[in-house]
Image: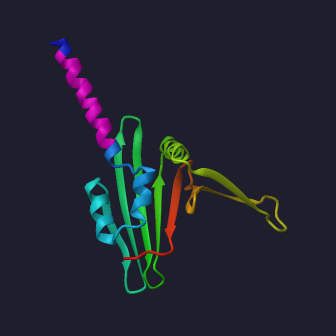
Amino acid sequence: MQKFMTLALTLLLVCGWASGLAQTLSPAAFISLATKKALEVDSFMTQKGFEKKVFSSNDDFSIVNYSYLAKTDSGAIQRSLHVGWRKKLNILELQYGLWQKKEAVDFIDQLLKQGFTKHTVSTPDIGGNSPSKSVHYQKDRLRIDYEEMDQGEGVKVYIFTIENEHYQP
């Protein structure tokens, strides 16, 4: 009986762990979404368990957010995909936000393993004390911008951005 309980508990933990992974985006999936049609993005994200919210949609632009929030023993897991489409310019911007540093580090590790290189650019602050820095990961002509945004009270969101300037809806 004890072996059965151990096996059942192990399966439960593995299933819970796997369902948490279902709501993540790999760098490859994130990159592929930049060329997908809106209905394909919507279908993909909702199938992964993300909740959709349309913030704006008109002839000029649309803004859609897909979010996932779950509570675990170790705290909350929050992820979001922000999709902004400037229709008249055919520019699509995707922002993947992660609220756990470990997930951001894992995402960066995957980018590096896929051949992306990290670039840090410093811009001088004329008349100021500190230059601003921007970070992006690049592979050939594909670029993913990265930033850490402080949301106050010790909460940070780690944002990966990809822009498709030749989006064909």
Q: Residue at x 56, y 45 (%)?
A: 112
* Quarter of the image where the N terminus is located: top left
Q: Residue at x 44, y 72 (%)?
A: 84
Counting the numbered discs, the total is 0
| Left or right of residue 168, residue 44 in this image | left
| Left or right of residue 96, residue 51 in this image | left
Observer-nearest residue: 156 or 3? 3
Q: Residue furthest front?
A: 140
Q: Residue furthest top?
A: 2
* Quarter of the image where the C terminus is located: bottom left
Observer-nearest residue: 10 or 169? 169
Place of residue 39 in the rendered image (x, y in percent of width and height, measured from the top left): 29, 70
Place of residue 68 in the rendered image (x, y in percent of width and height, measured from the top left): 35, 53
Question: Which residues make up the magenta segment?
Answer: 4-20
Q: Residue furthest right?
A: 127
Is-magenta flag for residue 15? Answer: yes
Place of residue 162 in the rendered image (x, y in percent of width and height, measured from the top left): 51, 63
Observer-nearest residue: 77 or 85? 85
| Left or right of residue 121, residue 49 in this image | left
Observer-nearest residue: 79 or 91? 91
Query: Magenta residues: mostly which secondary structure?
Result: helix
Q: How is the image coloured?
A: rainbow
Position of residue 95 relative to residue 11, above or below, is below
Position of residue 60 relative to residue 14, above or below, is below
| Left or right of residue 45, residue 8 in this image | left
Q: Residue at x 54, y 46 (%)?
A: 108
Is-magenta flag for residue 88? Answer: no
Image quadrant assignment for residue 47 = bottom left
Position of residue 38 relative to residue 101, above or below, is below
Place of residue 11 in the rendered image (x, y in percent of width and height, measured from the top left): 23, 28
